[in-house]
Amino acid sequence: MKALTHILPIGDGEGDHAKHGGGAGASAPGFAGRPLHRLRRSPSPRFARGGWAFAAALLATPSLAATTAITGGTVAIGDGSAPIPNGTVVFADGRIVAAGANVQVPAGAQVIDAHGKWVSAGMVAGFSTLGLADSEGVEESNDVSAGKSPFNAAIDISPAINPNSIILNNERWGGVTRAVVSPGTGGSIFAGQGAVISLGVGPDPVMRPRAFQYVEMGEDGAQAAGGSRPAAYAMLHDALAQAQDYRRNPAAFGGRERDSLIKRPDAQALIAVLDGKQPLLVHVQRASDIRSVLALKKDYPQLKLVLVGAEEGWLVARDIAAAHVPVIAAALVDLPESFERVAATESNVGRMEQAGVTLGISTVDASAPGSQRNLKQFAGNLVAITKIPGSTGLDWGHAFAAITSGPAQVMGMDGEIGSLRPGRRADVVVWDGDPLELASAPVAVFIDGRPQPQGSRQTELRDRYMTPQEGALPKAYER
């Protein structure tokens, strides 16, 4: 595969991070080792001054109250609506009860005063490798792809998600509460089955295992299939045909021979895709490739397609909308770094949204391998470009939805996560300012209604070296 996202440490230098057992995230679909530059974000001084006190007060609460009300803050529901000044968010038993203006605080509720702050839905990372790798450069810690495995579509990443990954702490600390996690392709166009996870502290982060099947098409898919796009489509059609053969007569299906094109578990896994029970996420960038992927519905009408990347999606936005195919879009990719995205533009997301495409944004294909918490920066820039003549972006509400309810809707999970609508899981972030502003940072994070620890390896290192004491440093520093 080719890779998708590259997760970088913050605060601490990358080398130090690796040295201490953390590290950059793995490569992920759509990156393929392309040149990258880095985005870094240091802990917010505003958080350092006041955030810890706010979070500490929450964590000092003896037990999780049955009902919690966060009052007085600017509330961002995450459903595309505008922020609501002086709003209230109420949640109980891990679910949102109410959010907005003039919300009654239930009797006996634990009340948290958020005047001067923002209260929002937690971010949903639209496409990531969170929990699959501790360091891209350390093969033993990287479970993103398996180029030497005989299996492809059958690969299920769920058992490999590491709830103790240092990277999860960093992302949660940045306001990310859920994530779509995908394997990367190795020796096939099929990468395997991804999952939707929670970033809440706990032993079992997997919220929905085998949530989708991931396929690489376009230039990367062509290389995986033998060298051309026609070869990639031949591989895709043959694999789906073999899955149908397996369903008709499993006993007669081979798939154990050394030279079989797909193995029995691969064929078995693809039946859920054929039946539309498992979405098929297809990474594709060029407009003509998008049309070819949309045409798959003619042969396989039950396919539940989702486009990933879609840098030239604006050229065929009406076709995508008419096909009712959602998109996990590459945010703000505007450089023609390959022949399959010569028409890339920062207006892509805005134009697709105007055409009626259901979408969320992601770090897929970003020339800057942003951490997932940088999604708020991308969303903020989509708001900012609306002020540039000739550019098309998103208003604040829809930009924030693109990193909250948008990815959830694409995955068919917006009834559970991604917004502060009643009944959704209580994933709530309290910010010290507008979450789409670079300088803003979380001061409290709730997942399923439970307050989450705000520290990370980076904050521990910051605290350690901010005021170093004799004897507190590693042996290498001892005289």
Image: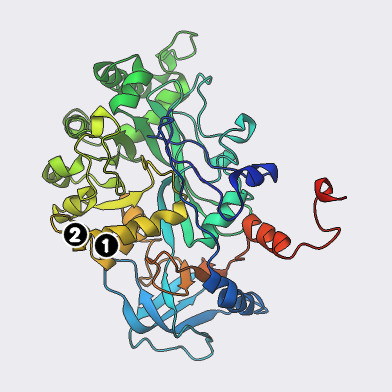
Of the pair 135 and 406, the residue shown nearer to us: 135
Return the x and y of residue 455 as percentages of the image width and height.
63, 63
Local crowd at mark 2 within 10 Å, few (<14), some, or many (≥20)? few
10 Å crowding of disc 1: few (<14), some (14-19), many (20+)? some
In this view, 412 is above or below 107? above
Quadrant placement of the N terminus: top left
Q: Which quadrant would residue 464 be assigned to in this image?
A: bottom right
Which residue type carries mark 1?
Ala
Labels 2 and 1 touching (C-beta < 8 A): yes
Q: Residue furthest bottom?
A: 107
- Residue drawn at point x = 46 percent, y = 72 percent: 431
Residue 242 position in % (x across, y down)? 34, 19
Left or right? Give the position of 242 relative to 260.
left
Dot 2: element: loop
The type of residue carrying mark 2 is Ile
Depicted 24 relative to depicted 166: above or below: above
The residue identified by callout 2 is 388
Q: Residue 258, position in %: x, y?
A: 50, 8
The relative height of residue 27 versus residue 465 in the rendered view (above or below) is above
Number of the label disc, if any, that sits on residue 384: 1
The residue shown at (69%, 64%) is: 466
